[in-house]
Amino acid sequence: MAIKLKSVEQIERMCRAGRVVRLVLDRLCELVAPGVTTEELDAEAERLCDERGGKCLFKGVAGRGGAGPFPGSICVSLNEQVVHGIPSRDVMIREGDIVGVDFGVAMDGWCADAAETYMVGQTDDDVRRLVEVTRNSLEIAVGMCGPGRKWSHVAAAMQGYIESEGFSVVREFVGHGIGVEMHEDPKVPNFVSPDLRRSDINLEAGLVLAVEPMVNMGSPEVKYASDGWTVVTCDSKPSAHFEHTLAITADGITVLTDGK
């Protein structure tokens, strides 16, 4: 792994990008409602980002296989969609949905990335608990990260909590380092794997990670939908997703995407 540590000044520049990410996600939280299309959310995100001189990170990213470049500024994933959902004028939000929005920004060459899952109106109790557990697992990571720790200890706590609540951790998609590129080393799993045990991540000052638990109500298995981008659960049960960009500092941790 070629992990690139960031200086205090560079982290502050990433924080500027993080504030735009938070501004957009908070605005989309206000807009999410029955009858709103996912394309409308995408247009508002792009407008706010452009207005503040940022660049939407996801738009134009190359697809896998035969999938074309990603067409949206946000990834918006509903219910059984896990991540990478494509915004569309044909997809309308409904009462009881859960809506995952992932959004990244570059400002002056430095990136930040975060995600939220919004509950629309009256959701089922088990779906509400899925969202709350996923959010809590990210908070566990925020609370545990700091210089001198190993990521495997954090991942084990996240995984243990999620599974004790009866849910499953997605294995195929993980968090990542972030800086001048949206995806940098290291890969940051939300579970403990043999690979992580062999090559653990030392949390040290200057390390910046995008930590993003993806949690399924049923099986952890996922697959690609026919559009080549959207990832869905294999059993069609709901999934939730939260993410923050976190900087390890000499004093502990700074959350770059909390708007502070």
Image (cartoon, rainbow, N blue to C red):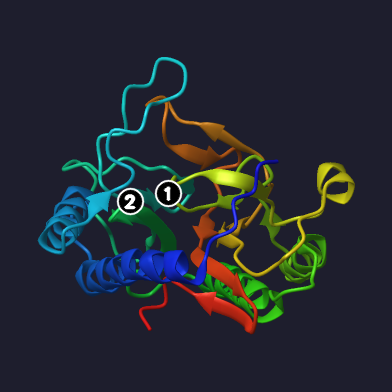
Residue name at image x 61 percent, y 57 percent: 215
Cβ–Cβ under 8 Å for marks 2 and 1: yes
The local secondary structure at tag 1 comes to loop
Give the side of residue 246 with respect to residue 154, left or right: left
Residue underneath mark 1:
180
Residue count near mark 1 (Cα–Cα under 10 Å), binned few <14, some 14–19, many ≥20: some
Residue 155, horizontal then vertical, whole percent: 75, 62
- Up-down relation of residue 250 to residue 208 (above or below): below
Residue underneath mark 2:
109
Q: Quadrant of residue 260?
A: bottom left
- Up-down relation of residue 85 to residue 242 (above or below): above
Q: Nearer the viewer, residue 42 or 5?
A: 5
Disc marking residue 228: none
Q: Quadrant of the N terminus?
A: top right
Q: Please give the count of numbered marks on the rendered protein.
A: 2
Q: For the residue marked with disc 2, what is the amino acid?
A: Gly
- Up-down relation of residue 84 to residue 207 (above or below): above
Q: For the residue marked with disc 1, what is the amino acid?
A: Val
Residue 40, horizontal then vertical, whole percent: 15, 54
